Amino acid sequence: MTPETARPFIDIHAPVAEALASGKPVVALESTIITHGMPYPQNSEMAANVEKIIRDEGAVPATIAVIDGRLKIGLSDAEREALAKTTGTMKLSRADLAFAVAQGRTGGTTVAGTMIAAHLAGIRVFATGGIGGVHKGAEKSFDISADLDELARTPVVVVSAGAKAILDIEKTLEVLETRGVPVVAHGSDVMPAFWSRVSPYAAPLRLDAADDIAAFFRTRQALGIEGGLLVANPVPAADEIPVETMAGYIDAAQRDAEAKGISGKAVTPFLLARILELTDGASLKTNIALVENNARLAAKIARAL
C-alpha cells in the first residue's frame, strides 16, 4: 500500500508490516502526546500501556514518529522509551513532516501528521487523545489546526475524546461541517469536551457500536466520498473532570498564555502543562484514561473493518 516514492523514507516495524500483509487489524497512534503532551515518565508508561490495550483487544499498535529523519510506522520498546526521554523534538504536522525527514530531525507527529503516515502505510484507524481545532480568539489570530483540513482529505477513522477543551469547540464543529467531515459521537447525543463527558454542543451524528462506525466508513469509501471520519468518544464517567470545574482552569491557563505572549504551535503544549499544574495532576490522570478508552474503541473499529 505504501507508494514506491515514499518507501526510501519509511521504516515499518516488523509486527506492523506482518499485520498489514496478512490483513490483521492495525491501530495507529500519534507521538506528540509522548513528546509534547505529557511529562516523563508518565508519557512512557502511558504509551506502553496504550499499545498493550490495543493488543489485548486483538489489534496491532503502530505508534508513529520521525526519528533521525526516518518516518517510523510502529516503534520498538527501546525506540518508544528513547523518544519519551528526548527533549527539543519537533511537533510535526503536514507542513513540516517532510522537512524533519529531509533534515534528519526527530519529532512527534500530530493528528494531521499521523493521519498522513497511517494512510501511507495502509492503516485505516487511528486513536488519539483529542484533535486540534479552532483556538479561542481565532477571529483575530487565525489559529486553526491543520488537523481539520487533514480530516477532510485523508481517509482515516480518528477516534478521539473530541476537540481539546482548551479550544473553541463550537467553531471547531462549524469548520468540520464546512469541510464535510462527519463527526460521530460514540454513545452520546452531545459532544464530549476532552476531560469532560459533555459540552454544551449537540453531536452532529451518533452511533453506539464499533460495527456501525466501521460500516459508515466503508459506505463513505464505497460512495467515493473523500476524507476521514471523526469519532468523539466520551471519557469514562469515573475518570472525568466536570466541565464546569475545567472551565475555570482553562480560563486561567488562557490568561497566562496571553500574558506570556505564547502563540502558534507552542500554545497547546503550554496550556496542557499549565492546566496540569492548576489541577494538581488531575488533568493528566484523566488524559491518560481517555487515551486508553479511545484505544479500546479504535481496536474494535479496526477489527470490524
Image (cartoon, helix red, strand yellow):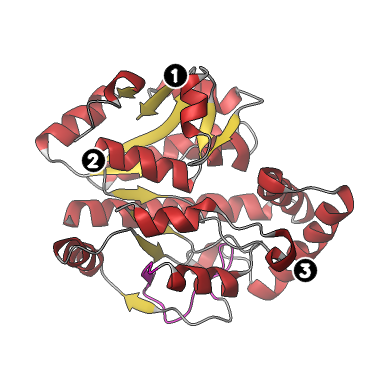
Q: Residue 78, which numbered label? A: 1
Q: Position of residue 276 (x, y in %)?
A: 72, 50
The residue lying at 63 percent from left, 50 percent from top is 284
Question: Mark 1 is on which residue type?
Answer: Ala
156 sits left or right of 199 in the view = left
Q: Position of residue 236 (x, y in %)?
A: 47, 65
What kind of element bears circle 3? helix
Quarter residue 119 falls in = top left
Q: Is residue 168 visible?
A: yes
The residue lying at 64 percent from left, 63 percent from top is 167
297 sits left or right of 43 in the view = left
Taking the magenta stretch, the answer to whether it contains residue 196 is yes
Quarter residue 77 falls in = top left
Q: Measure how far apart labels 2 and 1 are at the Cα level.
A: 24 Å
Taking the magenta stretch, the answer to whether it contains residue 192 is yes
Q: Position of residue 132 (x, y in %)?
A: 55, 55
Magenta stretch, main secondary structure class: loop
Q: Position of residue 124 (x, y in %)?
A: 26, 48
Disc 2 target residue = 122
